[in-house]
Image (tube, rainbow, N blue to C red):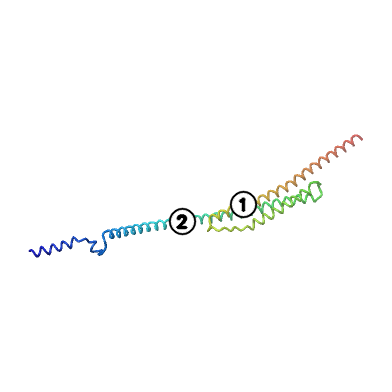
Amino acid sequence: HSKLLIVFALLGVLIISPIAAIAHEGESEEDHQAHLSEIARETAQEKKDAAEARVAEKRLAKDEKSVERRLKACERNLLKINNRIDRASSQATRHKATIDKVFDRVQSFYDSGQLTDPNYEELLVAALDAQNTAELDVATLSELTVDINCEDPEQALIDIKSYSSSLTPTKDSLKAYRSAVVDVIKSLRNAAAETNANANTDEAQTNEDEAQN
């Protein structure tokens, strides 16, 4: 029995021996704790990095969707500005043709010699200049090609506004052309009214002279 007690005593010493001392032979307890702390920090950092990577992936996916939305919006705006320019060009062409027709009739009437207007030549030159300017602007608008890079949304927005503003010169030149032709017509009307007034005066004077005789 005494031999068995001695054996059990030796086993007890082995069992209660520090596991750390067996696993990390030659390493102090302080070094071992520092090593465990380092492992814990590395594990925490790995989890943090993994979480940040997931967040970055989600943000990237969101950004990609946002870029896709901006790209589609730009393409829609590009289609709209193209349609707008096409409509404006067609309207400008028709508008100018209408003014041209009126202007041609006015010139034909005056060239027939039925009326004399001292202001006609000056007003005619101004109207012809306005006609030439309008013709150039209408031609420029009809040949306008919209070139916008939707891959750069900010620049695309600037370009779209620029193309929108390119419609203004044609509108202004057509207004100026119409106004110049109207000035010619008004002047001819005034000249006709003055001629009629003079004719009526002459006729009245003739009638009066005949009555006195």
Q: Tag on residue 165? A: 1
| 22 with respect to 164 (left or right) | left
Q: Residue at x 16, y 62 (%)?
A: 13
Residue 76: image location, x then y, percent: 53, 55
User: What separation in Å lies between label 1 and label 2 (alpha carbons)?
Assistant: 32 Å
Instruction: Depth check: give the residue in front, 56 or 30.
Output: 30
Task: Choose between 128 and 49: the one closer to the eye.
Answer: 49
Q: Amino acid at mark 1?
A: Ser
Q: Is residue 189 above or below residue 86?
A: above
Give the x, y percent position of residue 138: 67, 54
Seen in the image, is 165 located left or right of residue 207? left
Determine whether 202 is above or below 113 in the image. Answer: above
Q: Which residue is mark 2?
A: 63
Residue at left 91%, top 34%? Answer: 212
Secondary element at tag 2: helix
Q: What is the crowding at mark 2: few (fewer than 14 residues within 10 Å), some, or many (at least 20)?
A: few
N-terminal label among 1 and 2? 2
What residue is shown at x 39% (from left), y 56% (from top)?
52
Q: Which quadrant is home to the C terminus? A: top right
Report the quarter where the N terminus lies.
Answer: bottom left
- x%, y% of residue 26? 26, 64
Amino acid, disc 2 = Asp
Q: Give residue 6's mark.
A: none
Q: Residue furthest right?
A: 213
- In the visual, does 20 lie left or right of 171? left
Q: Is residue 156 above or below residue 197?
A: below
Q: Residue farthest to the top?
A: 212
